[in-house]
Image (cartoon, rainbow, N blue to C red):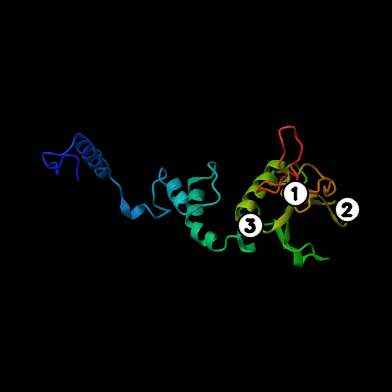
Amino acid sequence: MPADAAPLLPPNASQLERVLEQVMAGALSIDAPIDTLIDPQTISAEALPFLGWGLSVDRWNPDWTLQQKRDAVASAIALQRVKGTPASVKAVLATYDPLIEYLEWWEKTPRGDPFTFEVSIPMDGAGGTNSTAAFAEAVIADIVKVKRGTAHFALIQSIKAVGQVGVIGAARVLASARIDGVGQPDTSQPWDSFLQTEDGEPLQFENAAFQEQE
């Protein structure tokens, strides 16, 4: 009902009912282009995040361009259909760097532990974005959102050694962990014996002691 329309309530309507009528009249008078509200490419920038929420968009970065945000919402349904599969993880990795490698346990030589996979991030060796811990943390966080719940993974930041065959890298095996610098796989903590967060990190008490599983 337009705001200037004649009241529809009977003469004996309560004060609360009259107030609610006025509120609804104001709401219905708001110009809402229905034909654009479910189209990620034409919806207003202000309403786009709400459409993304309604479509269960898993990844959202306020620093993305408007077109990147529209594309993320537009692909939400397709990504939900493959969520929990290798395809969903590969789709996430492709948005960071097409050179990032994804390897399932059965594709490794020798084979890795069942229900695990490995993500290898190539570094440029010159302090580029891919070489930072912040980049690794962002990749880890997005992988956790889309991977299958039963899978564990190792993230490796590696750089091809100049003048020799092989790869120098750093990783924490079977845990989503922060990567700092170059070194050997960190197996100093038996994570499987501790309660863990969704990211695979062990939970700690206020005194920094790890919480062991019952």
**Secondary structure type for disc 2:** loop
Q: Which residue is drawn at 55% across and 44% down?
A: 61
Percent of width and height locating residue 4: 16, 39
- Report the mark closest to the observer, 2 or 3: 3
Rate crowding at label 2 as few (under 14), some (14 to 19) or many (20 or more) other CA atoms within 10 Å: few
First in sequence: mark 3 or mark 1?
1
Q: In this view, does 29 lie to the left or right of 198?
A: left
Q: Residue 147 carries which label?
A: 3
In terms of depth relative to the viewer, which is nearer, 165 or 37? 37
- Residue 34 can be seen, yes or no: yes
Question: Which comes before the other along the chain, label 2 or label 3?
Answer: 3
Is the residue under label 1 in contact with that under label 3 (CB below 8 Å)?
no
Label 3 or label 1, whichever lies nearer to me, is: 3
> Is 131 situated left or right of 142 in this image?
right
> Going from the N terminus, do you reach mark 1 or mark 2 first?
1
SS class of the residue under badge 1? loop
Q: Position of residue 180 (x, y in %)?
A: 77, 42
**Amino acid type at image mark 2:** Gly
Q: Mark 2 points at which residue?
A: 163
The residue tagged 1 is 123
Give above or below for 31 relative to 15.
Answer: below
Tell me which residue sits at (62%, 63%) in the image.
Answer: 85
- 188 to the left or right of 91: right
Front-most of 34 and 96? 34
Residue with the most extreme front position: 214
> Element at badge 3?
loop
Rendered view: 116 above or below 3: below
Pinpoint residue 3: horizontal percent, then vertical percent: 19, 40
